[in-house]
Image (cartoon, helix red, strand yellow):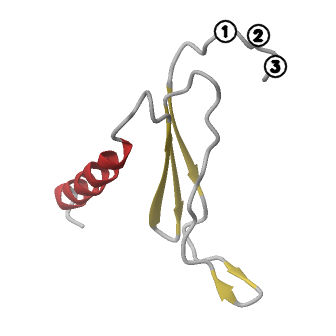
Amino acid sequence: MLFGHHPKLRPPFNLIISNVPWPRRPLYWNGARLDAVYPLSIPVDGQGLNITCTSNDDIISFGITGCRRTVPHLHTLTSHLGRELDALEHAVGL
């Protein structure tokens, strides 16, 4: 049982999107600069897709985790995501 839910019940949704913002300044550990953060989520039973977004020092990173049966062509989502981020940056003048 996870979070008090009955193990046979499916969640009311199968997509979770979350944003975990970090500081907008560079972070360091013992003098080494943190260059990237790659988020990873653990899907639960009945979840088809999880997209987690993190940002650090004005750099955004995405972690995409999905079920092969529910989202069989998950790899195509990454190319679409990159293309749409480029379009968004262009739209706002970056």
Look at 76% across and 10% down and name the residue there. Answer: 6
Pick whichever of labels 3 and 2 is earlier in the sequence. Answer: 3
Give the CA separation, mark 3 to mark 1. 10 Å
Q: Secondary structure at mark 2?
A: loop
Name the residue nearer the viewer: 48 or 23: 48
| Relative height, residue 14 to residue 43 (above, below) | above
**Disc 2 designates what residue?**
6
Give the CA separation, mark 2 to mark 1. 6 Å
Amino acid type of the residue tagged 1 in the rendering: Leu
Q: Do the CB atoms of the residues marked 2 and 1 lie less than 8 Å apart?
A: yes
Q: Position of residue 77 (x, y in %)?
A: 32, 45
Look at 77% across and 87% down and name the residue there. Answer: 30
Q: Position of residue 63 (x, y in %)?
A: 50, 52
Q: Do the CB atoms of the residues marked 3 and 2 lie less than 8 Å apart?
A: yes
**Disc 1 designates what residue?**
9
Name the residue nearer the viewer: 46 or 21: 46
Name the residue nearer the viewer: 80 or 85: 80
**Disc 3 designates what residue?**
1
Q: Secondary structure at mark 3?
A: loop
